[in-house]
Image (cartoon, grey):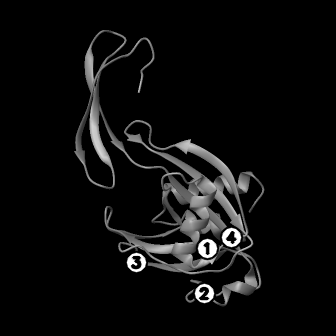
Amino acid sequence: MTAPDEWDLLEEVTEYETGWYDGGYDLLEQPDGTKKRYYWADLPPAVVIVARIDGDLVASIDGNGDDSPTDEDRLLFVEQYRPAIRETHLELPAGIVEDGESYTRAAARELEEETGFKPSSTALLQEYAVATGVLRHDRAIVYAEGLEPGERELDSNEFLEVRTVPVTTALERARERPANDSTMTALLLAKEDGLL
């Protein structure tokens, strides 16, 4: 990793490795000549999936979470407890991109693993850097549609319930507390792109 000419990277130190992410700091000489440690956490890339499901498939999902008619299209969400912040969140499906995977391939795999539905088409909406003041972490938003039943296969640390939310109220629902950045960002971008 190189710094622009006015910043001199003196040392890069990894202080710990967790299996989930690495943490450490860069010792930099700043443009004014002073030295400072900039701490970081390095995480693998991740993908967030905006998955549209036809209303006629919604009946196959237990616990839709509301009483809206099931003939309208919905988005798949997952509800899960987040131990790091000690809250249960309603979120879009998401997951880590494995080595050699594209964002769209990772999205299809994660969607099927978490929800039991596989998409017939996926489209990369955006790739971006997350929390650049402290994280080395890239994330992408993928839109998925043409969902068909597949095989659900949760990881050993995934305890989540599949929920659906009508497309017309998904953004409003995502803004209810507790809200999270990846779900709101993905829905806002999908709406801006005319997909919601």
Pointer 4 or 1: first along the chain = 1
Pointer 1 or 2: first along the chain = 2
Residue kind at label 2, given as amino acid type: Ile
Pointer 4 or 3: first along the chain = 4
Q: In the rendering, at what x and y percent does residue 196 appear? A: 74, 63
Pointer 3 or 1: first along the chain = 1
Label 1: few (<14), some (14–19) or many (≥20) C-alpha neighbours in 10 Å: many
Q: Quadrant of residue 158?
A: bottom left
Q: In the rendering, at what x and y percent does residue 85 appear? A: 33, 62
Comparing labels 4 and 1, the label whose residue is closer to the camera: 4
Q: Quadrant of residue 190?
A: bottom right
Q: Residue at x 61, y 59 (%)?
A: 105
Residue kind at label 3, given as amino acid type: Phe
Q: Secondary structure at mark 3?
A: loop
Residue 69 in sight: no
Q: Which residue is mark 4?
A: 119
Q: Residue at x 67, y 52 (%)?
A: 124
Q: Which residue is mark 1?
A: 76
Q: Which residue is mark 2?
A: 61
